[in-house]
Image (spheres, rainbow, N blue to C red):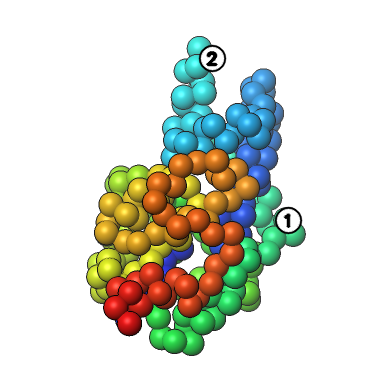
């Protein structure tokens, strides 16, 4: 049975700019004279993990900060921003989910963000997209190694009982593509507003999801 796996919350609704906004709001609230421009942020997104970005930025400026506390405050700001934002699922997402469910395919959401961030988005998008749509939701509490390690995808495959060749992943960043392909899963690149210039290797790049095309990339679709 094919499985379609979304690799981040921004493959469902583009939250990248809300994340950047939350970082800057948090820095201002904490009295830091940091302001991440869009160009700055795009360069930083090559490295996965908001806490790591904060720590690295502080080191580059010779400042000592509590990166964990700042990241926690950023996440809370992000969740508030999501709740207040006029968000909609990305092109083709709703139809892909409906088609997958109608055909009995399994669905996954495999991220290494927090469960609170995931639920903030899904609650905001419901009923168009909700947590009940997914057979597995992986967050950073489920695995020790973040992407580009394959751990999150390996965890998901074990949970849904599917082989890698019967799955297709949808990722919006290069580390995510590496994570999926290292796990043996065919991956489609679906860049968000700030990752379009990243190198997605041989992954097929799309600007809209199509359920039939995604199914065709699974083992069953390739052999049909």
Q: Quadrant of residue 195?
A: top right
Kindly state the secondary structure of the residue where label 1 is placed: helix
Visible residue check, residue 157 = yes
User: Mark 1 = which residue?
Assistant: 84
Give neighbour class at mark 1: few <14, some 14-19, many 20+ (Cα, 10 Å): few
The residue positioned 62% from the left and 55% from the top of the image is 14
Q: Which mark is residue 61?
A: 2
Q: Residue at x 29, y 78 (%)?
A: 223
- In what quadrant of the picture does the N terminus appear? bottom left
Camera sees residue 117: no
Foreground pick, 215 / 194: 215
Q: Position of residue 103 (x, y in %)?
A: 44, 87
Q: From this view, report whether residue 22 is shown above or below residue 203.
A: above
Residue 121 at x, y = what percent? 59, 60
Crowd rating for badge 2 (residues with CA inside 10 Å; few <14, some 14–19, many 20+): few
* Camera-side mark, 2 or 1: 2
Residue 173 location (% of width, % of height):
48, 47
């Amino acid at each position: 049975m094919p499985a379609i796996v979304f690799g981040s919350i921004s493959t469902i609704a583009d939250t990248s700019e809300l994340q950047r906004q939350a970082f800057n709001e948090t820095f201002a609230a904490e009295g830091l004279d940091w302001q991440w421009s869009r160009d700055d942020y795009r360069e930083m997104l090559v490295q996965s993990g908001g806490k790591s970005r904060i720590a690295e930025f502080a080191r580059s400026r010779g400042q000592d900060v509590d990166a964990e506390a700042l990241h926690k405050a950023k996440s809370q700001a992000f969740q508030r921003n999501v709740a207040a934002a006029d968000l909609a699922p990305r092109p083709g997402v709703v139809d892909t989910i409906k088609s997958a469910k109608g055909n009995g395919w399994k669905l996954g959401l495999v991220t290494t963000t927090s469960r609170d961030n995931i639920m903030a988005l899904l609650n905001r998008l419901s009923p168009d997209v909700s947590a009940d749509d997914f057979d597995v939701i992986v967050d950073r509490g489920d695995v020790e190694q973040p992407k580009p390690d394959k751990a999150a995808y390996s965890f998901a495959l074990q949970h849904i009982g599917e082989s890698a060749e019967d799955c297709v992943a949808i990722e919006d960043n290069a580390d995510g593509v590496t994570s999926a392909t290292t796990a043996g899963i065919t991956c489609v690149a679906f860049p968000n507003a700030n990752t379009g210039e990243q190198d997605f290797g041989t992954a097929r790049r799309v600007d809209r999801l199509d359920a039939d095309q995604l199914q065709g990339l699974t083992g069953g679709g390739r052999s049909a």
